[in-house]
Image (cartoon, coloured by chain):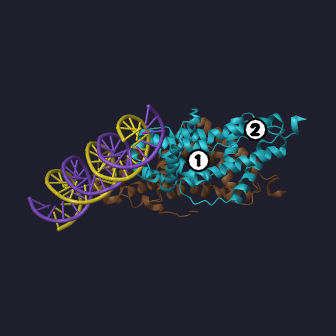
Chain colours: A brown, B cyan, C purple, D yellow
Amino acid sequence: MLHIVPDIDTSETLTERQKAVLDAALRLLVEEGDQLTMTAVARRASCSKETLYKWFGDRDGLLTATVQWQASKVRVAPVDGKGLDLASLTASLERFASDWLKVISSDTSIALNRVAVGHAGSGKDNLGAVVLENGRFALARRLKPVLEAGRQAGLLDFADAETAFRSFFGLVARDVQIRLLLGDRLELTEATIGGDAVRATQQFLALFGAKTGPQGL
Amino acid sequence: MLHIVPDIDTSETLTERQKAVLDAALRLLVEEGDQLTMTAVARRASCSKETLYKWFGDRDGLLTATVQWQASKVRVAPVDGKGLDLASLTASLERFASDWLKVISSDTSIALNRVAVGHAGSGKDNLGAVVLENGRFALARRLKPVLEAGRQAGLLDFADAETAFRSFFGLVARDVQIRLLLGDRLELTEATIGGDAVRATQQFLALFGAKTGPQGL
DNA sequence: GCCGAACCGTAACGTACGGTACGGCTTGCC
DNA sequence: GGCAAGCCGTACCGTACGTTACGGTTCGGC
């Protein structure tokens, strides 16, 4: 189990120039995979290697900063659980599903997950933890209040929000992420994602929708 | 899309000595992650680097051979779809779910997927394709006949076996694989896996079980 | 205008590792 | 026994890359 909540405000302590350097590193990571070399980053960012080392310590520090920098950018506005009816709950779930599919199928996410997976093998740093915390666990934190609200409103029926969330996660992601990480060319168009989001939501509601009407009346 | 069926019979063309060398490489891969160096493999296997290069060409060749060697070992006996009733279908699905969870949570699978994911980034070889082909796609090939048989017997109701399979896959795996690959310490005991297999199977049947009795009577 | 800090560009250093070469040992064949 | 093939162990080579060092330039403060 890892439930570390890393510094959220890394974006605060970075100068504009540093952000620009990290953006360059990010682009390079997406383009070239893990062969990201310090020289390449320096050249791409038009900065000196000396500066990279001064700012980020070493290569792993740069990688970590890059991942956290990206993580700080993808934070999505949470959905409010007020005035919940079946239609709005459905819409929220579809929105979450759609957003999540877009995230995990993006070039950036794939590149970041690849490098994090690679580093998790040689447990030098906790890149994997950072990615997990800002990906799967962040999603759970945002979605669970919605699920709880759905239960309060008598629309959903489950014993444990975590378990319900994991089933939703599975129904949405299915084999998409592992296939993409392993290099499968999976074309996820806007339409495909929309359809999958609707399907996953319907399946989730079929499994966890309250059998009775609202409030068990 | 990748639907390459690589040589199945790699195990045939390998001498016992070569299998022993690949086993050594496999153990090293599990223990040390991707820093698997040629020198380390040679030392562990008590063979010379010259021999490694003669047999496997280069480092990527060794890696590919190792992955294929492992893949050739995990091939599981397919379930026959004869005399299918709800009980035996349920048992088959639970068996598939349990087997799959055991596979993806094994040290070997995690190590192999990590190196394959890493290599998929720098698309030099098709390790990712090999892993996918012997993992997720092999599972689909073995499970789909069962699903089709279930449909023929009037126990299941779905339009597309591929879609049904992917939902089953999602319900079984959920977030397990990505969490493990990213280094999350997820304790999957025998009991946990068994419970998850039952749960996933029940959920799948709830979604795809035929509403009417057998044969639509 | 002067000074120091920060930073750019580049050169240099050290090492790890993929790949190659070679001497010596075993083994099977004549 | 002689010989060739296959293989082990080790030394060696070349390169890529992380890391450090340094001269030159810009810029804010005085």
Q: Chain of mark 1?
A: A
Q: Nearer the viewer, mark 2 or mark 1?
A: 2
The answer to whether residue A70 is left or right of residue A155 is: left
Q: What label does residue B147 carry, if any?
A: 2
The answer to whether residue A55 is left or right of residue B157 is: left
Residue A102 in percent (x, y) is at 56, 43
The kind of residue tagged 2 is Leu
Residue B60 in percent (x, y) is at 44, 41
- Please tell me how crowded label 1 is: few (under 14), some (14-19), or many (20+) other residues with Cα within 10 Å: many
- Please tell me how crowded label 2 is: few (under 14), some (14-19), or many (20+) other residues with Cα within 10 Å: many
Contact between labelled residues 1 and 2, with CB atoms less than 8 Å apart: no
Q: What label does residue B13 carry, if any?
A: none
Residue at x-position 57% and y-position 56%: A138
The kind of residue tagged 1 is Trp
Q: Which sits in the foreground, D21 or A214?
A: D21
Q: Which sits in the foreground, B206 or B1?
A: B1
Q: Secondary structure at mark 1?
A: helix
The answer to whether residue A50 is left or right of residue B133 is: left
Residue farthest to the right, as pictured: B217
Residue B30 in percent (x, y) is at 52, 53
Q: Chain of mark 2?
A: B
Compared with C13, B77 (above or below) is above
Quadrant (top left, top right, bottom left, bottom right) of the C terminus of chain A: bottom right
Kindly report the distance in space between the C-alpha atoms of the residues bearing marks 2 and 1.
28 Å
Quick check: do tags 2 and 1 share a chain?
Answer: no
